[in-house]
Image: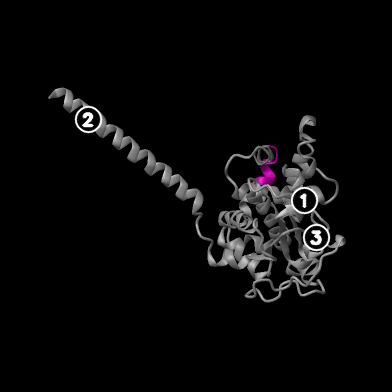
Amino acid sequence: MPELHVRLEKKMQRILTIVITSGLLSGFCHLSATPIPPSQLDRELVQVVRRTEQTEAVLERVHFALSKMPESIKEKLRQRQIHFVITPTQAEIGNQEGGCGFYPKYRRIVVPETIRGKPIQLARLPIITLHEAGHAYDSIVKGSQNPVFQAAYLSEAGQIPKEMRQTFKHFLQEGNKGPVECFASLFARKYWRDPDALLDALEKHFPQSYRFVQELESTPGNAGQLTAPEAYESDSVKAEQVGGGNRNSPVPHLDVRHTKVDKVLHFATQHYK
Ligand SMILES: [Zn+2]
């Protein structure tokens, strides 16, 4: 009888193990197969030019990036009629072929599903999306132009060790490009807290610049004080085309075609290979 008891006990343990394991697996599958549904605001902020087989996966990654950002920032983008536009390719909306980019004149963050014939890499797309959102946010608050940020950036950029300069070349570009790109990626770092080699290194080597970006949205109204409204008007709102359109319409202004010169802020895709 004791033997039978032991056998039964072992059988019960096996059944229990199978039940727990399958439960955990289905839990994981559930997590990966069913992402958190995007909020109403997240849906409003994203437009799709034309659906392809890739669109759903790209859309999910963009919505995932948006889920990382606070409502206050997304509300600022919405108020400025800035949208994330997913397109099969940059060429399809009249742009030069290439990766993701922020187009201030048209108030768009363009996310192409395919770059020069290759599908966009989905793994790092949320970080790239946050980087481009950082450019859009910067166009509103002028954070990269703020004297406090500029001083921190210049001091820290000057101290980058020689062996790191190649890694950071995107952030050490001459003129205004360096601080603008640095600001955008520090913005991405702020909202992307998972390990990422480049963002980890950037945070480490630009601590004061990062602190500035961190504190920007933490104090209500702080961002608004950083820039005079006319500064924003001068480079974005004066665009002669109707950049915003009707935000209730799924694709309100895709008749507006970009040209090479409109793309004043560079894309991050090559940098993030
Ligand atoms: Zn950039």
Q: Secondary structure at mark 3?
A: helix
Q: Earlier in the sequence, mark 3 or mark 1?
A: 3
Residue 60: name its quadrant. Answer: bottom right
Q: Residue at x 65, y 53 (%)?
A: 130
User: Which labelled disc corresponds to residue 91?
Assistant: 3
Q: What's under tag 3, amino acid-wise?
A: Ala
Q: Earlier in the sequence, mark 1 or mark 2?
A: 2
User: What is the distance, in whole Å, between disc 3 and disc 2 at their CAs?
Assistant: 66 Å
Q: What's under tag 2, amino acid-wise?
A: Glu
In-image side of 197 versus 1 (left or right): right
Q: Secondary structure at mark 2?
A: helix
Given residues 164 and 101, the one toward you in this image is 101
Q: Which mark is nearer the camera, 3 or 1?
A: 1
Q: Residue at x 68, y 70 (%)?
A: 81
Q: Position of residue 160 (x, y in %)?
A: 76, 35
Local crowd size for mark 3, using a 10 Å CA cut-off: few (<14), some (14–19), many (≥20): some
Q: Position of residue 71 (x, y in %)?
A: 56, 62
